[in-house]
Amino acid sequence: MTQITGYRDLEEWKLSMKMAKDCYLVTRGFPKEELFGMTSQIRRSAASIPANIAEGYGRDQLGEYVQFLRIAQGRLKELETHLLLCIDVGLAKPPALQPIIYECERIGRMLSAPIRKLKVQK
């Protein structure tokens, strides 16, 4: 088992950083007129996920950490919704976005475990 010495050691942070990078890469192929629309929305929500995990980890209070993990979960659902909408309106084909949607679900499950565990410890 790996020892956690900082937020960069958290598996959910690592995976969400990779997912954010993937979102940036996939949105490069979006039409230019979406730069301030869906492209921006996807990038902001994707970048917010690891940022909230890191910020919560940096807080001194357990309750605050849990709150930031919940915010990250909310941003995951927001990102997933944007990605599904992109498929529905034809901005991207399912094979391009499905792996990211899968990662949203996976990271969401990973965040649920510490939220439940830490809630009990409060």
Image (cartoon, rainbow, N blue to C red):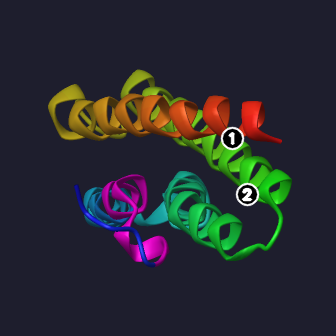
Residue 120 position (above or below residue 76): above
86 lies left or right of 95: right
Q: Are marks 1 and 2 in contact (CB under 8 Å)?
A: yes
Q: Mark 1 or 2, which is nearer the eye?
A: 1
Give residue 100's quadrant in the image.
top left
What x and y, as percent, mark residue 20? 39, 61
What x and y, as percent, mark residue 53? 58, 61
Q: Which residue is mark 1?
A: 118
39 lies left or right of 62: left
- Element type at marker 1? helix
Q: Residue at x 56, y 57 (%)?
A: 49
Q: Residue furthest top?
A: 88
What x and y, as percent, mark residue 103? 32, 38
**Span highlighted in magenta in the image:** 6-16
Q: Earlier in the sequence, mark 1 or mark 2?
A: 2
**Residue 37 belongs to magenta span:** no
95 lies left or right of 9: left
Three-letter amino acid code of the residue under disc 2:
Tyr
Q: Which residue is mark 2?
A: 65
Three-letter amino acid code of the residue under disc 1:
Leu
Q: Residue at x 41, y 37 (%)?
A: 104
Q: Residue at x 33, y 63 (%)?
A: 14
Q: Nearer the viewer, residue 67 or 85?
A: 67
- Looking at the figure, which quarter contains the C terminus? top right
Residue 101 position (above or below residue 42): above
Prevalent SS, magenta region: helix
Measured Cα–Cα span from mark 1 to mark 2: 9 Å
Q: Nearer the viewer, residue 27 or 122?
A: 122
Q: Residues within 10 Å of mark 1 (few under 14, many from 20)?
A: few
